[in-house]
Each structure stands twice: as structure tokens, then as C-alpha cells.
Amino acid sequence: MIKSKSFVKATVQAILAAALFGASMPFSKMLLGKIDPLLLAAFLYIGSGISSLLFVLLRGIGRKCDKAEAPLERADIPWLAGATVIGGMAAPIILMVSLRVTPAATASMLFNFEGVATILIASLLFQEAAGPRIWTAIGFITAAGILLSLDTSGGWGISIGALGVITTCVLWGLNNNLLRNISSKDPLKIVTIYGLCAGTFTLIPALVLGRSLPGITIVLAALLIGSISYGMCIMLTVLAMRGLGAARTSAYFGTAPFIGAILSFILFRELPSMPFLLAVPLMIAGAILLLGENHCHVHKHLPIEHEHRHRHDDMHHNHTHEDGYCGNGAHSHMHKHELLVHTHPHAPDIHHRHDHSKITEHLIELDIADDSIVNPPSSVEEADTARQNN
């Protein structure tokens, strides 16, 4: 099945986000011996916020780009504030405290459950569709991540600290889902607010706890890594969630340790370990399952009015402009969607977060015979015609 351009684009964005975050691991490792971990986390976030703020300011110089993205509104503040507090402030602090009393091998293994937590929350709290194929894919990727982080030479043990690491993964999973709910808004402004707030409120506790600041060179290096790996990573993750939803984006993000391991082999001239070799086929199997997904069924779009970045050459934005605009360039403005019933391959993007438990109800409501599902109606008018013919 040929994938839509938006699906392919979102998939590439998710993989690039994973690559950037994976790249941050070995580069951050090079700084850990010279800076406290909590301070490092703070400067990484601050770096992402500063770089995004600069892009926002530069973009503001060109008025043509002002409406390329939907602005953040008052209704978006709770979602962004929740993500910033939960994922950018609480999670890193709980993690740093937990790591003090948790064996390194145990902590490394438990980090891989962020993806599982994201999908559980997306499915249970936000009713995002995640069938057996997605669960199998995340299972393969999580298993590969566990193999990559396996350290039989270190100490093992389940303690209150291990529960803290699991709590961190759950908080990050909730953070991912909260960001998904504002993924249609300006990603640069999201990263700016998220990065500066999370970094500042992580830096303050670190200084209160007596962590000593490193030299300016180390600080600048951390800010640079944060601006590239964290800033662009968060922005691409938000963009990917527009087209894939939280569950599938998180599944792709689970490949980050694999990418980080490959970079470690190059930077530190390490040889691939046996766990890495065993993890490769699992990671590939998970990726194939994700890329090969074909989620297609009759679904109904309810009337809605909203604003987000869109184009007119897709099958969901055929509205007209009062100013006579008829181009296919990406732009953002408030627009209306009429009632529409059709079928095509789709993911839980911003237009397809429907409740799958009601698919049968929708078909019954349309009173369409089973044999017409092969060529389901593409509009309400066709649905009415099908009803009359039956």
C-alpha cells in the first residue's frame, strides 16, 4: 500500500528525532565527567530553548512566515504547562535522585520502558488506536533496547530507586501525550517555552543543592548539544506526532539507543558487543512492522473548526479562501471541516483520532450494506446514494 506524503514525512521526522536524541547520548557522555548530571540536563534544555527562541525571532523578521504555523492559544497553555512541569522538571529531578540509589545496570534497562508507558497512556487515557501490530513492534524495539543496555558486570537490584526510574518513564510517557495534544501548534514556540522553563527550573534546584558550575567551555558545549540534539529533537517529535500520534512516534523514538550505540562505536572506537548484535534483528523487525502498517477503514469526520498548518492538495482541506487564494503551499488559518465519510490508509494524526469502538456504529448509522465496504463512500452524498440504492 502506497503511503501518503504526510505519513512518510512524519515517519522521517520521527526517525530523525530519534537519531538526534541518540546522538546526544555519546556526546553528553563526553561531558559527564566534567559537569554534574543535573546541571547537564538543565543546560541541555536551556540550549534547546535559546536556539528555538533565536529562530522565532529571525522568523519574525520575515512577515511572510507569520502564518505558516498556528499560534499557541489560551486553551493550549494547560497542555504545554503540564508537559513542561511533568516531563521537563519533575521527571529529571526524580531521575537524578533515583539514580543515586539504583544500580546502573538496572536503571539502563528500565529506561527502555518509556515507549511502553507512552503507548499505554495514549491507548487508555487518550483512546489512540494501537493494534496488535504496533504492540508487537514496540515489544521488539523495547527488547532490543534492553539488550543494548544490558550490563552483566554491574550490580543489579530492585529498590525504591528503581521504582523512581519507572516513575520517570511514566512521567515522560505522559509528557509525550500532553505534547501530542498541541502538536498542531507552532513547534518552535513550543520548544522555546518548554526548553527555557524546564531548563531554568532544573538549574535552580541544582544550584540550591550546591552543585558547582563548570567552566564556561563546558557550559557552552552543553548548550550547543542541547540546541541541536534536544531542540531539534523535540521540534521534530512534535511534528511527527501531527502525522503519527504519540504511540507510533514513541515506537520510532525507541530506536534512539540503537543509534546512540552506533555513534559510540565510531566516537569511542568500541567494538560491537554480543547484546548489540542480538538486538539488531529485533530492532529491524520492529521497524518493519511499523513501516508496513496499513490502517484503513471507513471513518467519519465530524464538523469542526480549528487552526493548524495545512495544504490544499490533500483530501481533507478543500475549503475556499475569501481572498481568493488557491495555491497548495503550507499555511495556517482558522478553517472549517464539513461532515465527511470516506476511507483511506491513515494514522492517528490530528484529523484521525476517532474512537474505533464506534466504527460499526457509524456503518449502521449510514445503513450501508456490507458489500459496499469494498468501495466505501467518499462523501456524505455518496453515502446517501448508497443508502437509497440499498
Image (cartoon, rainbow, N blue to C red):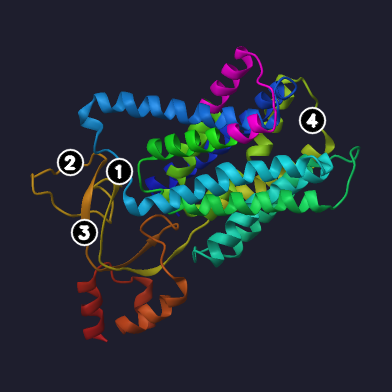
Amino acid under label 4? Answer: Pro
Q: Which residue is found at the position 45% from the left and 37% from the top?
A: 191
Q: Amino acid at mark 1?
A: Pro
**Disc 2 versus disc 1: nearer the observer:** 1
Q: Is residue 209 magenta?
A: yes
- On residue 80, which mark appears? none
Q: Main secondary structure of the magenta part?
A: helix
Q: What range is drawn magenta here? A: 203-227
Q: Earlier in the sequence, mark 1 or mark 3?
A: 1
Which of marks 2 and 4 precedes in the sequence? 4
Which of the two residues, 303 or 38, is positioned nearer the viewer here? 38
Work out whether mark 2 precedes mark 3 in sequence or the reverse, and give the earlier one. 2
- Between the C-alphas of marks 2 and 3, the distance is 18 Å
In the rendered image, the vertical position of residue 234 relative to residue 243, given as above or below: above
- Residues at marks 4 and 2 touching, judged by CB atoms closer than 8 Å: no
Q: Earlier in the sequence, mark 3 or mark 4?
A: 4
Question: To which residue does mark 1 refer?
Answer: 71
Q: Indicate the position of residue 208 as horizontal and vertical percent values.
A: 65, 32
Give the spatial CA distance, label 1 vs label 4.
46 Å
| Residue at x-position 14% and y-position 44% | 326
Q: Which residue is mark 4?
A: 272
- Count residues near mark 3 (Cα–Cα under 10 Å), then give few for <14, some for 14-19, many for 20+: some
Give whichever of discs 2 and 1 has the lower sequence position.
1
Q: CA distance from mark 3 to mark 4?
A: 53 Å
In the displayed structure, 337 sits above or below 334; it is: below
Which residue lies under the disc numbered 3? 336
Judge from the rendering whether residue 322 lies leftward or rightward of residue 381; answer left or right.
left
Looking at the rendered structure, the secondary structure element under dot 4 is loop
| Distance CA(mark 4)–CA(mark 2) | 51 Å
- Please state the horizontal and vertical placement of residue 227, each as a whole percent of the image: 51, 26
| SS type, badge 1 | loop
